[in-house]
Image (cartoon, rainbow, N blue to C red):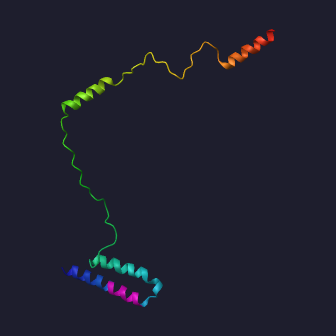
Amino acid sequence: MTDEATTENKKDEMLEKLERILETTPENSKQPIRNLINKRKVELGLMKSELLVAGYKLKKSARKAVPRKPSKATMKSLTQIAKGVGRVSEKKDEVSVDIDVKDEPLKKERKITEENDSYKY
């Protein structure tokens, strides 16, 4: 118990010394001494630290929902979807409007044949 009292007295003495030094120093060099005084006050428990708490914050894990048994309707719809997966339905008897079906050759081919025919005569 006497050891604790002497350490507290030493810390108080150190704090007093820093405050005396603070009074005698010029204004532009006071900030480091103020930081030392604040650290000493935090050590004594006179002031709360502005630093973040070191380490990780433990989060409570979210409770997982209890799994429910799916209803018959959802099971039925899921089986229908599963049966349909992988099937490709082919469309039959569908003629697209964009496709021009004629017996005539394309324009380029027609020009080439016309040029060839013109040399004959």
Where residue 10 sits in the image (x, y, percent)? Answer: 29, 83
Could you say which is closer to the camera, residue 12 or residue 53? Answer: 53
Residue farthest to the bottom, as pictured: 24
Q: Which image quadrant is residue 74 in? A: top left
Q: Which image quadrant is residue 20 in? A: bottom left
Residue that appears at 37% across and 85% down: 18
Residue farthest to the top, as pictured: 120
Residue that appears at 57% across and 19% down: 100
Magenta stretch holds residue 120: no
Could you say which is closer to the camera, residue 14 or residue 34? Answer: 34
Where residue 116 sits in the image (x, y, percent)? Answer: 76, 12
Residue that appears at 22% across and 79% down: 4
Numbered range of the magenta stretch: 15-23
Relative to 65, 32 lies left or right = right
Q: Eyeballing the image, is 102 above or below 98? A: above
Where residue 50 sits in the image (x, y, percent)? Answer: 34, 72
Q: Quadrant of the N terminus?
A: bottom left
Q: Eyeballing the image, is 20 above or below 100? A: below
Could you say which is closer to the camera, residue 66 or residue 24? Answer: 66
